[in-house]
Image: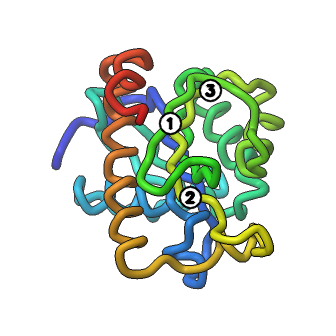
Amino acid sequence: MFWKKTAVEWLLVCLGNPGREYETSRHNVGFLAADYLAGRENTPIRRVKYKALTAEMRLGGASVLVMKPQTYMNRSGQAVSEAARFYKIPPERVIVLVDDVALPAGKLRLRSKGSAGGHNGLKDIIAHLGTEEFPRIRIGVGGKPHPDYDLADWVLAPLKGEDLKLTLDTCKRATEAAECLIQEGFDKAGQRFNT
C-alpha cells in the first residue's frame, strides 16, 4: 500500500524479546501482532532505529511508527523514550501492546493508563516516560496452569497448536483495537474491544 509519508503522529510499541527461541512465546504477543501488521500492510518491520526494529505505516488514518524494541522486555523503555522524544509524541499517543497473564487467553483489555501490574516491560516504559498515562492493549495469554510452574518459564515457552492459533487471532484483534483507538478514540475502542 502506497501513501505519502508524513510526520509520525503515534507510536505503536509491540513488546517482545528478540531471538528465535522466543518467537512464538506468550511474552512475545506484541511482536506477533507487529508481524501480523507487517504482513497485512506489506511493510516489513526491519529498519533499525531507537534500539528497535521499526516501520512507518498508515493506520487508523494516521502516520504510525510501529516498533519492536530489541532491548529485551525489561529495557523496553529505552527504545520508547528515544522515539517519543525524537518525534515529540506525547504519552497519550504511545500505544503499547503487551502480554497479560492475569487475562484468559483470547481476551483483550484496553486501558488508557495505569500501573505496570507486575509487568517489567511496562514498568520500564513508565520509568522512561515518567508517567503511567499512556494507553496499553493487554493481550490475554492465560495464567500458568499449575502454581508450582515458574512464571518466566511459562511465558517464555513456545505456543503450539490451538494455543498458538488462538493467540494469533487475539494479536490480530489487538491491532484492530489499536487502529480503532487511533481513529475513533479510546472510549470507542474500549467499548468495542474490551472483553
3 vs 2, front mark: 2
Of the two numbered discs 1 and 3 on the same chain, state the one appearing first in sequence: 1
Q: Circle 3 — which element?
A: loop
Q: Residues within 10 Å of mark 1 (few under 14, many from 20)?
A: some
Q: Circle 1 — which element?
A: strand
Measured from the top left, where is residue 73 in percent x and y?
Answer: 71, 59
Real-space Cα separation, disc 1 to disc 3, in angstroms: 14 Å
- Which residue is tagged 1? 109
Comparing 139 with 3, the one in front is 139
Q: The C terminus is located in which quarter? A: top left
- Residue drawn at x 42%, y 29% is 7
Measured from the top left, where is residue 166 in percent x and y?
Answer: 36, 63
Real-space Cα separation, disc 3 to disc 2, in angstroms: 23 Å
Residue type at the position of mark 2: Gly
- Residue drawn at x 66%, y 66% is 144
> Which of the 4 image quadrants contains residue 183?
top left
1 vs 2, front mark: 2
Of the two numbered discs 1 and 2 on the same chain, state the one appearing first in sequence: 1
Real-space Cα separation, disc 1 to disc 2, in angstroms: 13 Å
1 vs 3, front mark: 1
> Which of the 4 image quadrants contains residue 80?
top right
State left or right for residue 37 relative to residue 88.
Answer: left
- Which residue is tagged 3? 134
Q: Is residue 180 above or below residue 13?
A: above
Q: Which mark is residue 142?
A: 2
Q: Residues within 10 Å of mark 2 (few under 14, many from 20)?
A: some
Count of labels in the image: 3
Measured from the top left, where is residue 163 in percent x and y?
Answer: 42, 71
Q: Residues within 10 Å of mark 3 (few under 14, many from 20)?
A: some
